[in-house]
Image (spheres, grey):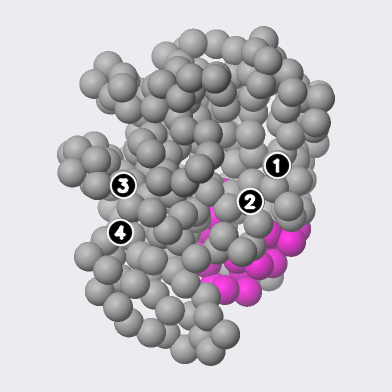
Amino acid sequence: MFMADFHIHSQFSDGKHSISEIVDYYGKRGFGSIAITDHLCETNTFLGVGATYLNRTLNRVNFSKYLETIQIEAERAEHQYGMKLIPGFEITKNYLSNHRSAHILALGVSEFVSADDSIETILKNIRNQGAVSIAAHPVSTQRIEKQTFHLWKQREELSLLVDAWEVASGAVLFPEVMNSGLPMIANSDLHRFSQMSSWKSCFEGERNVESILEKIKTQKLSFQFFKEENNGISIYRNASAEYCNSY
């Protein structure tokens, strides 16, 4: 079994660390796969314009450099740690209203997708390039931060286009998602290493990108809580929070 985290931000958007630093951090902790998912914001909204001005978003200009950097680091991650690094991004539609806001992770991407398009068009564009779509933190994260409820409100209409829904953001499990019957995945939404303690997804078998993405879609995965402590790594196994230690 190997552990994975598919919601990680780097200095290409609002993360604190470089992609190289992220690879080393996760690689040294034995992770089998991670994805870099920097924000890709709308260009026609006030908040999106602000993100562009502050260099907190991917755009058409820096997207090629972003993919190139991930590719270089993916080769190093494989050679040095046996870890698969997956290219991704987080479509970011932020409005003043939480009920209009929506974030969509795309994993295994090779092409730019405009965040200005409709939700349905974005999801279809992600699928058309063979990538996997994930509804990011679709319910309350129980933190004082921007919330994104639009996808959850439209879950019946979007269920055939969204491949998985985040059942956890960081250390918080979402009972609404867990009990929904929808396909699920657990990620950290990491922006800095101090956020490493969180629910993660775990996989059995071969470590290759195509297989991992297929296992997300077919729900061949489990969830564990990863917590790093001074005296070792503590893991809460599965969503039942059964505790064990690994040193």
In the rendered view of the protein, which quadrant contains the N terminus? bottom left
Of callouts 3 and 4, which one flags the residue occurring earlier in the amino acid sequence?
3
The percent position of residue 139, horizontal first and vertical second, equals: 36, 36
Tell me, for residue 191, which label it has, or none: 2
Q: Is residue 183 left or right of residue 32?
A: left
The percent position of residue 216, horizontal first and vertical second, equals: 36, 45
186 vs 196: above or below: above
Q: Are marks 3 and 1 in contact (CB under 8 Å)?
A: no
Q: Label 4, on which residue?
A: 222
Q: Closer to the camera: disc 3 or disc 4?
A: 3
> Residue placed at 57% from the left, 34% from the top?
90
How far separated are the C-alphas under marks 2 and 4?
Answer: 23 Å
Q: Which amino acid type is shown beneath numbered disc 4?
A: Ser
Toward the viewer: 129 or 172? 172
Q: Label 3, on which residue?
A: 174
Of callouts 2 and 3, which one flags the residue occurring earlier in the amino acid sequence?
3
Q: Which residues are magenta?
A: 20-35
How far separated are the C-alphas under marks 2 and 1?
Answer: 7 Å
Of callouts 2 and 4, which one flags the residue occurring earlier in the amino acid sequence?
2
Mark yes or no: residue 216 visible.
no
How far separated are the C-alphas under marks 3 and 4?
Answer: 15 Å
Q: Is residue 167 left or right of residue 87?
A: left
Of callouts 1 and 4, which one flags the residue occurring earlier in the amino acid sequence?
1
Q: Label 1, on which residue?
A: 14
The 10 Å Cα crowd at callout 4, few under 14, some 14 to 19, many 20 or more, is: some
